[in-house]
């Protein structure tokens, strides 16, 4: 049995403005002691397979600038990936970037359910509660999800400094991408290196898109986040781009772009 008192699954930092909500699915590389590091070395748990390196620093700095509530996952995505559907076998990776995750090789249905209940459910319940609170207070928040990506994958360098992931609803993604692209010396990926994929990504579709909320899913290159100063600089760029692009008439109104065929029913179904 996992000792939940010693393993907080989510960190919530309250903000005073309810026009924004910032989340970070892969903020931590923490693995509770009882999991014996999933059979991985200390160095492996510092690597991108365990978390989105630097993403939490950017998310914290951006939420401070927006005075927005920030919700961070408290554990490594190798325990369970909070941005994947929990009934997907890939949500608990047996192999990541060609590395065997020994602690994930043979799991019973009960063990998978325990990870879902202990790590996945509290994180998404906190997001759902924050959005419900904002809406109860009369706000329609913009949903901002912060991720990071490794600079090279399978021997192929990735040239983008930052990527904007979106599908169908580009109210925020389009103008923010335009403003970032206008900054000198910055290469911006339009759905590169990752697109926002309905049916694969969980957090933005099931929380933001299901509610009709405008949203922004960010990917920053990890080697550009090597220091606190670097993360702060990116947060400042993002803050400026977001505020200069902001359209109160469209960003803080609901727009539903999903269909029944998408199978997105809202995060409450999974809680």
Image (tube, helix red, strand yellow):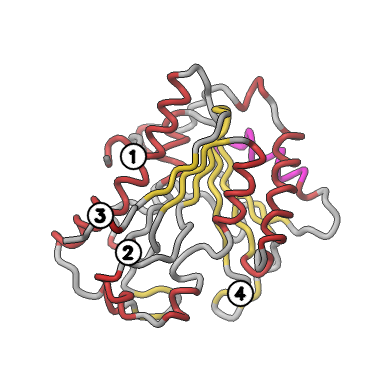
Q: CA distance from mark 1 to mark 3?
A: 15 Å
Residue 144 visible somewhere in the drawing: yes
Which residue is pictured at 29% across the width and 46% down the height?
121
Labels 1 and 4: the sequence-earlier one: 1
Mark 3 is surrounded, within 10 Å at the Cα level, by few (under 14), some (14 to 19) or many (20 or more) other residues, namely few
Q: Residues within 10 Å of mark 4 (few under 14, many from 20)?
A: few
> Bounds of the magenta span?
168-179
* Circle 3 residue: 4
Labelled pair 2, 4 in contact (Cβ < 8 Å): no
Location of the C terminus by quadrant is top left
Which residue is disc 1 drawn over?
Answer: 125
Which mark is in front, 1 or 3?
3
Asked which quadrant contains residue 63, the reply is top right
Name the quarter where the N terminus is drawn. bottom left
Q: Nearer the viewer, mark 2 or mark 4?
A: 2
Residue at x 28%, y 76% (from the top left corner): 36
- The residue pinned by badge 2 equals 79
- Image location of residue 209, percent across then percent down: 46, 35
Q: Is residue 142 visible?
A: no
Residue 152, label in figure: 4
Q: Nearer the viewer, mark 1 or mark 4?
A: 1
Give the residue furthest to the top: 138
**Is residue 58 shown left or right of residue 187?**
left
Instruction: Looking at the image, tell me whether mark 2 or mark 1 is earlier in sequence order.
Output: 2
Which residue is more in the foreground, 238 or 207? 238
Which structural element holds mark 4? strand
Q: Pick whichever of labels 2 and 3 is earlier in the sequence.
A: 3
Q: How many residues crowd mark 2 within 10 Å: few (<14), some (14–19), many (20+)?
A: many
Specify which label sits upstream in the sequence, 3 or 4. 3
In terms of secondary structure, where does tag 1 sit?
Answer: helix
């Amino acid at each position: 049995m996992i000792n939940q008192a010693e393993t907080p699954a989510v960190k919530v930092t309250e903000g005073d403005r309810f026009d924004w909500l910032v989340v970070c699915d892969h903020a931590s590389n923490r693995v509770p002691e009882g999991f014996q590091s999933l059979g991985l070395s200390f160095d492996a748990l510092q690597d991108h397979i365990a978390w989105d390196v630097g993403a939490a620093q950017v998310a914290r700095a951006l939420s401070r600038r927006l005075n927005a509530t920030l919700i961070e996952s408290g554990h490594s995505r190798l325990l369970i990936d909070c941005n994947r559907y929990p009934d997907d076998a890939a949500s608990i990776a047996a192999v990541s970037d060609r590395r065997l995750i020994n602690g994930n090789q043979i799991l019973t249905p009960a063990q998978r359910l325990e990870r879902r209940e202990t790590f996945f459910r509290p994180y998404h319940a906190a997001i759902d509660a924050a959005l419900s609170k904002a809406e109860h207070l009369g706000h329609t928040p913009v949903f901002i999800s912060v991720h990071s990506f490794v600079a090279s994958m399978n021997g192929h360098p990735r040239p983008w400094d930052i990527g904007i992931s979106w599908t169908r609803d580009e109210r925020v993604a389009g103008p923010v991408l335009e403003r970032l692209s206008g900054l000198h010396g910055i290469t911006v990926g339009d759905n590169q290196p990752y697109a926002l994929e309905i049916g694969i990504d969980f957090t933005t579709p099931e929380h933001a898109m299901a509610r009709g909320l405008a949203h922004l899913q960010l990917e920053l290159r990890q080697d550009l986040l090597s220091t606190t100063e670097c993360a702060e600089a990116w947060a400042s760029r993002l803050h400026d781009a977001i505020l200069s692009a902001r359209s109160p008439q469209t960003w803080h109104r609901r727009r539903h772009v999903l269909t029944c065929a998408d199978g997105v029913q809202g995060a409450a179904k999974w809680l």
